[in-house]
Image (tube, grey):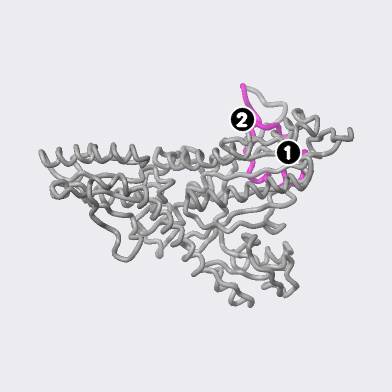
Amino acid sequence: MTPQSEDFSAWYNEVVVQAQLVDRGPVRGTMVIRPYGYRMWELLQADLDGRIKDAGHDNACFPMFIPESYLRREAEHVEGFSPELAVVTHAGGKDLEEPLVVRPTSETVIGEYMAKWIDSHRDLPLLLNQWANVVRWEMRPRMFLRTTEFLWQEGHTAHADEDDAMRETMWALGAYTDLARDLAAMPVVPGEKTPGERFAGAVRTYTIEGMMRDGRALQAGTSHYLGTNFAKAFEIQYQDEAGALTLAHTTSWGMSTRMIGGVIMTHGDDKGLVLPPRLAPYQVVIVPIGRKEQGEQAAAEARRLGAALKEAGVRVHVDDNRPQLSPGFKFNEWEMRGVPVRIELGKRDIEAGVATVVRRLPTVEGQGKEQIPLDKVAELLPGMLDDFHAFLLRRAEEFREENTAAVDGWDAFAAQVASGWARAFHCGENACEDGIKAETAATPRVIPSDAPEESGECVKCGRPSAYGKRVIFSRAY
């Protein structure tokens, strides 16, 4: 496998295929998510879906074909998405009277039905979520990160006023932040986007940004306060307590299979994937060692141990049905596929009443492999997996801090964004952002929510900073 330090992009393209996460689809820019990769998505989906439902939202399903006229009702929205649209003009053997857009996002079609379903203030808030696939015609595809078709969830809500809509917007941002840390061990930075980076049609856009192991940023989830822009376009209004018709305030927010790419690039190394335990399809793989009778004895003990681990709530796989492969080959394969813990079980282990437990990465110096009494493995493994999650989160936080710096001068800024994140003052002007991107390929990723209040001169043009704090700039995926 290509080392990360030699060519991070090549490493990524190789690991997603070799680890059997994905294959290229038959149409340029599409992907086939293989079972191992889809299981990661299912685990993420189950966790996030629980958070969404616990907060009072209901799942629904809307059509993937949207009349083109719907998009044209919100001018900024259609302008922002126009280059990415896939449009159907011919179906059923004839030209369509109106072109149909293959869903790039659902603000328009859901807005149409919100207008039908909302009459009174008693109908608010309306809290909807959809799990769906979307299509955005991608010119430079990369598996999981930017593909023509991908999977996601999109929340869409309507509220009586700005305050309630903003509470919803920030709830979604917090849910994404917590999920990234709790499930993916990704220490993301939450905050607001600059006006030049806002979602098309939004009043305010919020994001979570993670640092990948090449120092670049990845936008891993977004939450948008849409104000009354879509309410005006689709007449989403309600009768208030005084009997007057009032426009609703709407939000939208989403997280996609891009998150899987984020996990790969946050934790992986030159040997392949390193998966956080709570997103790993197999948290533990048991490899029995031996041939003939010894092998059969080891396999039987491995199956018994696997059943005990499963009973303890651990996702476990016993690799006992590939006798043509050597244990060493299996060790390397499961290491490349990122399994957090591997258990080696042979005759000597069984006779000694122990299992040899190997972590994908040593959590402390010299603690990569240890022997644990067989009758204690099922009891100890859940705690070991939690410790491994905490280790990965801490490791990623330390890497981010080591590769982030506050800079004030242009030369220092350009040097810093070449390989990491720069915290710099910014005037907020789109033209200035365009100039920064043209010269360095860096963009303003996020105005961090928890950044200290500071003021200074824009790192590019010298005008006063617009946000009262430093903005994180980086090259990004």
Determine if the magenta segment contains residue 342: no
Q: Residue at x 28, y 39 (%)?
A: 306
Q: Which residue shows up at 68% across the image and 64% down it?
A: 433
Check if residue 81 falls in the magenta segment. Answer: yes
Q: Residue 459 in the image: x percent, y percent? A: 67, 73
Label 2 crowd (10 A; few <14 / some 14-19 / many >=20): few
Q: Nearer the viewer, residue 102 or 452?
A: 452
Q: Position of residue 442 (x, y in %)?
A: 60, 64
Residue at the spot 43% in from the left edge and 46% down from the top edge: 278
Q: Amino acid at mark 1?
A: Ala
Answer whether labels 1 and 2 touch (C-beta < 8 Å). no
| Image: magenta residue range | 65-92
Q: Quadrant of residue 290?
A: top left
Residue 128 image offset from top left, x and y in percent: 65, 35
Estimate the x, y position of residue 369 in percent, counting from the top left.
Answer: 26, 57
Q: Judge whether 9 appears above or below 201 on screen.
A: below
Q: Amino acid at mark 2?
A: Cys
* Residue nearer the viewer, 123 or 247: 123
Mark 2, residue position:
61
Label 1 – label 2 distance at C-alpha? 17 Å
Residue 164 appears in the rendering: yes
Query: Which residue is tagged 1?
Result: 158
- Quadrant in which residue 455 is drawn: bottom right
**Left or right of residue 168: residue 416:** left
Q: Is residue 14 visible?
A: no
Circle nearer the viewer, 1 or 2: 1
Q: Which residue is more in the foreground, 28 or 213?
A: 213
